[in-house]
Amino acid sequence: MLALKFVKIEEYNRYLLEDENKNQYSLVLEFYGLDKPKIDDVITLDNRLLDKNFEGYAQPYAFEIIKSKNDYDEKRKIDYAILTINGKQLPIRRIYG
């Protein structure tokens, strides 16, 4: 899991994200059922989703909020992330991408 800070918001849901080492990533992200992130918010997600050589790499990645613990499937760890907005952590899961 890698924590990425939102540093720039572009058109068409393209976000420029930065890790703690100042490496930058450009991703198209969609969020359903929750507020869109703003500058300085953080998303923590599986590193493989950033690897263009990973067979599951695709964009956009779309996420929705996890409503209950029953929605969690241990076999699909790659699909789960945490979105931190204004210091509040929201568990989210990838629904496509």
Image: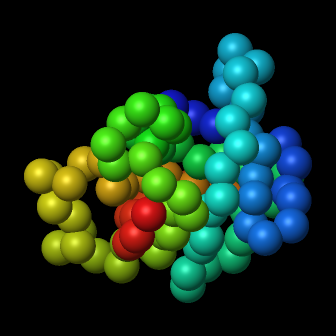
Closer to the camera in the image, 8 or 58? 58
Residue 60 image-quadrant placement: bottom right
Residue 89 position by quadrant: bottom right
Q: In the image, residue 96 lies at what x, y percent?
A: 40, 70
User: What's the residue at 44%, 63% (across, down)?
Assistant: 97
The colour scheme is rainbow
Q: Is residue 72 left or right of residue 32?
A: left
Left/right placement of residue 15 relative to residue 54 reads right
Q: Is residue 7 left or right of residue 94?
A: right
The residue lying at 51 percent from left, 69 percent from top is 62
Task: Return the x and y of residue 45 as percentages of the image width and height.
Answer: 47, 43
Q: Residue at x 12, y 52 (%)?
A: 75
Q: Is residue 86 visible?
A: no
The quadrant the N terminus occupies is top left
User: Quick one: which residue is furthest to the bottom in this view?
Assistant: 33
Q: Is residue 65 above or below residue 51?
A: below
Q: Position of residue 61 (x, y in %)?
A: 51, 62
Q: Residue at x 47, y 74 (%)?
A: 64
Q: Is residue 21 above or below residue 25?
A: above
- Position of residue 4 relative to residue 92, above or below, is above
Query: Does the image show residue 22?
Result: yes
Residue 73 at what x, y percent from top left? 16, 61
